[in-house]
Image (cartoon, coloured by chain):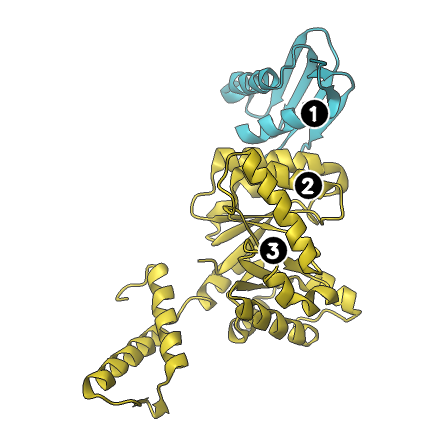
Amino acid sequence: MTIVRSAVAGTLESSDALVSIAPSRQLEVHVESVVMKQFGDAIEASVRQVLRELSVTGAQIRVQDRGALDCTIRARVETAVLRGGEEKPS
Amino acid sequence: MIRSMLFIPGNSPSMLQNADIHRADALILDLEDAVSPDQKDAARVLVRRAVQALGFAGCKLIVRINPVDTAYCEEDIRAMVPLKPHMIMPTKVGCPETVQAVSAMVGEAEAASGIPRGAVGLIPLIETCEGIENALAIARADPRVKALFLGAEDLTSDMRAKRTKAGQEIGYSRAKIVSCARAAGVEVYDTPFTDVNDEEGIEADTALAKSMGFTGKASISPRHVPVINRLFSPTPEEIEYAWEVLDIIEEARRQGKGAISLRGKMIDKPIVDRARFVLQMAKMLGGEGV
């Protein structure tokens, strides 16, 4: 999946996360969280795993977490990628 | 067995993550009215990931999908069927052909995801005058149909009737949908009571639904779930009476009597069937002494 346009998914409501994505040559992941000290590394690892699953190798990603569960963060990242991406030609 | 069904908006992480703590027998994960058109894609992804991660053990899963005449319907089915929900709820079902069209799409999605054909059932949402009048044909439209569900808000709008708490305006529709579901041998579920703060109202509305023959009732509020579960469960008096019925029937058989009475009332086959059903239901609910 190639990120070809900016896109967002999710909200800033409690238990959710707002994920913004933009085209970039390299992968840049930026996480802000109300539980950054405890879960910042785990959130970033989840984001990178979803990006790998979707074959995204270049993108700027910003995650503003409001105490979301791991499955919610993964869902919002996936949605942002699908909204901002196009399938790579095979 | 399903007594209570709780609606959960498909794009609400806070409600999804706590969905199974309210003791509802089933969750209706809603991709339709609770999700705005520009968030349908996000809701599908969130529901899929939430079900895969959280499991919702102890709750049967139902997914309310968008109407078959929208672009969302097919995508909903493709995304949800691999999760093996107990049932898919097609919306605005007015005729049997709609059920058959959804069933065909579900069948394709089952085959694509390696799920046994027929594993996913259907619970058509009947919420138009056309749907009420075609309820029997809808219930018999396809072997996947396991239940019918009455949606009173859209129905009363279609009827040009005022929706009231007492519900006289949907009396005919309630009776008709119960009769059609029972004729087709499927379960039938009542519309939610929408005033979440009216505790007497939910009690009365649920008691009415049970007395009319509904299998259970849906809810838009977790606060209504305990009332629905309680009223749709057999009471200790009903269980005791059911045992008395079976005992007296056994006694009649021993004595070679063709007819027998209990508490001044003749005990015939419908009463025995009802007693057996009450005891079976109590046993499924883990009732003691059953």
Vertical placement of residue B132 versus A44, above or below: below
Badge 2, how many Cα within 10 Å: few under 14, some, many 20+?
Answer: some
B14 sits left or right of B260 in the view? right
Depth order, front residue of B67/A37: B67
Look at mark 3 in the image and give the residue it sits on. B220
Chain under label 3?
B
Q: Position of residue B185 (x, y in %)?
A: 51, 66
Residue ID at (52%, 72%): B213
Subunit that carries the residue with mark 2: B
B182 lies above or below B59? below
Kindly identify the residue that appears in the image at 40 percent across and 75 percent down. B274
Say which residue label 2 marks. B74
Give the number of the mark in front: 1 or 3. Answer: 1
Q: Residue at x 57, y 34 (%)?
A: B112
Which of the two discs, 3 and 2, labels the residue nearer the N terminus?
A: 2
Q: Are marks 1 and 3 on the same chain?
A: no
Residue extending farthest to the bottom is: B264
Q: Quadrant of residue B239?
A: bottom left
**2 and 1 marks on the same chain:** no
User: What's the colour of chain B in the image?
Assistant: yellow
> What amino acid is at disc 1?
Leu
In the displayed structure, B6 sits above or below B168; it is above
The residue under label 1 is A82
